[in-house]
Image (tube, rainbow, N blue to C red):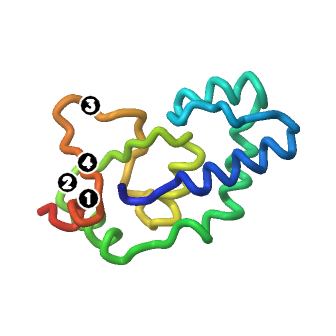
Amino acid sequence: MLVDTGPLWRDWLEDAARRARVSLDDLPEDRSAAAAVLDERLGDWRPLLERFAADRAPLHFRPRADVGKAVRRLHAAGTHINAYSDAPPELAGLALQHLGIARHVELVAEPAPGDEIVDSRAQLLGLK
């Protein structure tokens, strides 16, 4: 995992539940599945998440020079880099922006067959 969006997601859920006066305690852990429940209970919730996350992202996500350098090096070598997350795109994309790698990384829903999966900073830094 290059960045953990979970704490910001949970903060937003707590804030959204309080503001909308709805219970979100029974949301599925999988955020893709939770999105369907949020659609039913909150309607157009994605802009709310995006604004909330944009305000608080600097507290949760910090650029890492070593990660940025590794991603730029791989991109310059012609490597196509995808990021996968069960987080809503509004949150995952914001995390990539704050890491300073959004220009070089495409956010996609799930890996394609044959993709090499890198799920840690150490693993990313070790790629050639």
Q: Residues within 10 Å of mark 4 (few under 14, many from 20)?
A: few
**Residue at image x 29%, y 58%?**
120
Using the numbered discs, state the Cα–Cα distance from disc 3 to disc 1 in whole angstroms. 18 Å
**Residue 57 at x, y = what percent?**
61, 63
- Read off the residue under disc 1: 75
- Read off the residue under disc 4: 80
Indicate which disc, 3 or 1, sits on the residue closer to the N terminus: 1
**Residue at image x 21%, y 60%?**
123
Three-letter residue code for mark 3: Ala
Say above or below: 28 vs 94.
above
**Residue at image x 78%, y 44%?**
16
Using the numbered discs, state the Cα–Cα distance from disc 1 to disc 4 in whole angstroms. 7 Å
Three-letter residue code for mark 2: Gly
Residue contact at pointers 2 and 1, CB within 8 angstroms: yes
Q: Secondary structure at mark 3?
A: loop
Say above or below: 76 vs 88.
below
Indicate which disc, 4 or 3, sits on the residue closer to the N terminus: 4
- Read off the residue under disc 2: 78
Q: Looking at this view, is 7 or 43 the one in front?
A: 7
Query: Any mark on residue 112, and which?
Result: 3
Q: Secondary structure at mark 4?
A: loop
